Image (tube, rainbow, N blue to C red):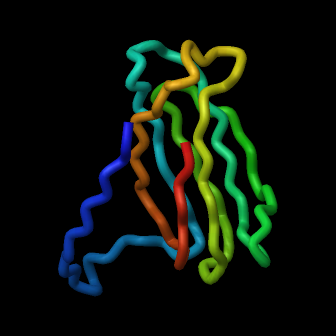
Amino acid sequence: MRTKVIYRKIEVKEKDCQIIAGKIMGCIWGCCCCHDHDYIVKLYKVCDEEKIQLYCEKVGTCGCFEFDVPYDDCYILEVCPDRYSGKDINCKPMLTLKNVGVSSLMILN
């Protein structure tokens, strides 16, 4: 399964912008395997081509996460099934990002 990224240009008036700098927030709304299970959400900072883990938390189905970080760094968000509750290695979360207040964020799953 390949992920397809579609870029769209959206004009936003400055007063309507509600992105909070330094916050990464999102929710997991379930899994494409149609089973309820937990996920492990990890946030890494990329420094000199090396990943440094900053946060690691367990999020259930229909659970949310929030991280406070400096805006200017490069980050990797990794979302994977909890090894004790994941039904299949091919489980993919239905992920919604509500706030990406950093200059660079990559997502792994």
Q: Is residue 76 left or right of residue 61?
A: right
| Residue at the image position 60 percent from the left and 54 percent from the top | 77
Corner quadrant of residue 69? bottom right
Residue pictured at 75% horizontal, 52% vertical:
55
> Residue 57: image x %, image y %?
71, 40
Q: Residue at x 64, y 57 (%)?
A: 67
Decide: is 90 above or below 95. Answer: above
Q: Residue furthest front?
A: 1
The quadrant the N terminus occupies is: top left
The percent position of residue 18, horizontal first and vertical second, equals 37, 71
- Whether residue 69 is situated above or below residue 27 in the rendered picture: below
Q: Residue at coordinates 67% horizontally, 25% vertically from top-left? A: 82
Q: Position of residue 40 (x, y in %)?
A: 66, 35
Above or below: residue 60 compared with residue 79: above
Marks counted in the figure total: 0
Identify the image quadrant of the C terminus.
top right
Q: Position of residue 12 (x, y in %)?
A: 22, 80
Please identify the residue farthest to the bottom as the structure is shown.
Answer: 14
